[in-house]
Amino acid sequence: MSKYFKALTTSLNNNGKYINRITKRAIGDLPNYELLVKVKYSSLNYKDALSATGIKGVTRDYPHTPGIDAAGVVEESSNTSFPVGTAVIITGYDLGMNTSGGFGQYIRVPSKWAVKCPASLSTKEAMMIGTAGLTAGLSISAIAEKLKLMNLSVIVTGATGGVGSIAVRVLSSLGAKVTAVTGKKEGTSFLKTLGAEKVILRDDFLNSTKFPLNKALYSAAVDVAGGNILSAVLASMKYNSIIAVCGNVAGAKFETSVFPFILRSNSLVGIDSAEASIKTKKNIWNNFANAWRIKNIKSMCKEVDLDDLLPEIHKIIAGKQTGRVLIKL
Ligand SMILES: NC(=O)c1ccc[n+]([C@@H]2O[C@H](COP(=O)([O-])OP(=O)(O)OC[C@H]3O[C@@H](n4cnc5c(N)ncnc54)[C@H](OP(=O)(O)O)[C@@H]3O)[C@@H](O)[C@H]2O)c1
């Protein structure tokens, strides 16, 4: 086993700026957890870009290797349930936050963070899905707990992004009628390919919404945007709707009234993929390996090496990514 590995490392320079460099790191410097995993693939999520640019609330101490997702093979283990050679997926908990993350060729993690990669899913496919897919999956499960997905009218915001694109694809394949809201004029054909029945431009959606209540149009929502987009979503829901709230790219605050709740009996459901129980994560991964299997998922992803990751980090921060970014370690 090599003593050193390649990683993207974020550090704070003398001018108070966060800089990213490809570095050689020592395996011995990783935390002392049960599993040493040789990372084969990681993926880029919005939170990684926050960590890699020093935005407060994600990572406390630098230098740090971000990457909240990793999939690879156990190389050392002190837990007999995860013998050497086991293919594993690790997403969320503290990985890439304050524990050295998947943007490095090795990680050390507690075994309670690891899910065995289902037999019918490769580590590469798992990372094409990643935390974005897990979050879309948790949102879809929260909706499916209360409502039948077949023919359900569902609105998905931030639809061309990581969470949004997987939500559009899986919901459509399960029979839902998906309306995708996007800020990208050029995103329409991509969203139609994913199965969206209707695509609305973000500004048109906002301009066409009347407050406090709009015409009731949708029975469920997956909202990655928050802010004024969530306000408009809430005004547009039918009676007994479920709104799964999972992101805040448009802002953390939103305005609403009691009317969507007391006149239309709507439910707002919060989604957190990072701290979801390992049992819940296993269930979602099994769904992706079986009933929710995404055919030709490659077409929704761009593959990059660690050396080419930085421009992708800047692009996700600017809200300009389409689909998923897979990172080959
Ligand atoms: N709760 C959880 O567990 C969890 C897990 C993963 C991610 N998240 C959150 O979910 C959000 C999306 O993450 P992601 O990885 O999917 O990021 P992403 O790939 O960058 O997707 C976000 C998409 O939102 C849209 N968008 C960007 N800026 C916007 C703005 N100002 N107003 C409205 N829409 C905007 C864009 O899509 P269009 O151009 O198509 O509109 C963008 O592609 C983030 O806030 C992230 O922190 C939460």
Image (spheres, rainbow, N blue to C red):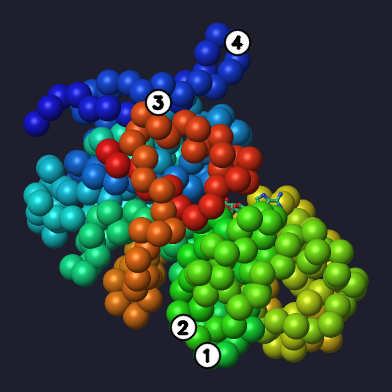
Among the two numbered marks 1 and 2 on one chain, the one whose residue lies closer to the N terminus: 1
- The picture quadrant where one finds residue 258 is bottom right
Residue 157 in the image: state x and y as whole percent: 65, 64
Q: Give coordinates of residue 285: x percent, y percent.
A: 33, 68
- Report the residue that reaches farthest toward the top: 14
User: Residue 170 in the image: x percent, y percent?
Assistant: 46, 74
Q: What's the residue at 60%, 15% (across, down)?
A: 16
Please tell me whether mark 1 sits on a helix, a strand or a loop: loop
Classify 10 Å Cα crowding around label 1: few (below 14), some (14-19), many (20 and above). Answer: some
Label located before the other in sequence (2 or 4): 4
Q: Which residue is mark 4?
A: 15
Q: Give the secondary structure at mark 2.
A: loop
Q: Which residue is mark 1?
A: 150
Q: Residues within 10 Å of mark 4 (few under 14, many from 20)?
A: few
In-image side of 238 versus 47 (left or right): right
Front in this rendered view, residue 185 or 103: 185
